[in-house]
Image: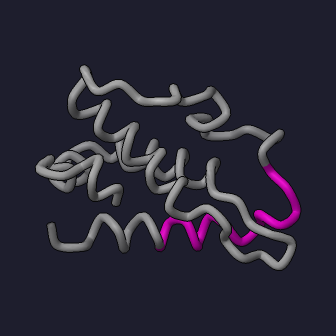
């Protein structure tokens, strides 16, 4: 996940020890990711990057997120970001976050 942003950081142990951190990166990833009209993900790398930025800031408080995260990106529930095309997203996003977190460093 965000290899360049998280390079050299043992983020996996943080995610295993602090479930709320995993919950937050899941929320960011799910809020930022976009689907086209056919349900195809169009910005997976950007969504991954935004989640990785938050995680780095969580681990190292002096990391500056640019551009700063907006409230809708970090929200657990934001009805303004939901659409009929996003109904499949929670399963897809959780599988992607799990796959990325499970990769060897």
Q: Is residue 104 left or right of residue 99?
A: left
Q: Is residue 34 left or right of residue 13?
A: right
Q: Residue at x 31, y 31 (%)?
A: 57
Which region shows up in magenta? 82-95
Q: The N terminus lies in which quarter of the figure?
A: bottom left
Residue 59 appears in which quarter of the rendering? top left
Q: The C terminus lies in which quarter of the figure?
A: bottom left
> Within the magenta stretch, is there residue 80?
no
Residue 17: percent from the left, percent from the top? Answer: 20, 47
For the stretch drawn in magenta, the main secondary structure is helix
Residue 35: percent from the left, percent from the top? Answer: 74, 66
- Name the foreground residue: 84 vs 1: 1
Q: Residue at x 54, y 45 (%)?
A: 28
> Within the magenta stretch, is there residue 83?
yes
Q: Residue at x 25, y 20 (%)?
A: 62
Residue 76, compared with residue 71, is above or below; it is below
| Count of number-bearing discs | 0
- Name the foreground residue: 55 vs 17: 55
Residue 46, compared with residue 38, is above or below; it is above
Q: Is residue 96 left or right of residue 83?
A: left
User: How is this picture coloured?
Assistant: one colour
Q: Residue at x 27, y 53 (%)?
A: 4
Residue 104, compared with residue 66, is above or below; it is below
Residue 61 appears in which quarter of the rendering? top left
Residue 23: percent from the left, percent from the top? Answer: 44, 47
Residue 27: percent from the left, percent from the top? Answer: 54, 47
- Do we see residue 61 in this rendering? yes
Residue 44 appears in which quarter of the rendering? bottom right
- Do we see residue 20 in this rendering? no
């Amino acid at each position: 996940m965000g290899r360049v942003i998280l390079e050299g950081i043992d983020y996996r142990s943080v995610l295993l020890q602090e479930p709320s951190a995993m919950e937050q990166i899941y929320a960011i990833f799910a809020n930022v990711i976009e689907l086209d009209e056919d349900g195809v993900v169009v910005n997976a790398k950007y969504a991954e990057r935004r989640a990785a930025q938050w995680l780095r800031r969580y681990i190292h408080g002096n990391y500056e997120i640019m551009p700063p995260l907006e409230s809708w990106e970090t929200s657990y529930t934001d009805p303004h970001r939901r659409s009929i095309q996003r109904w499949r997203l929670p399963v897809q996003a959780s599988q992607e976050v799990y796959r990325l977190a499970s990769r060897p460093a």
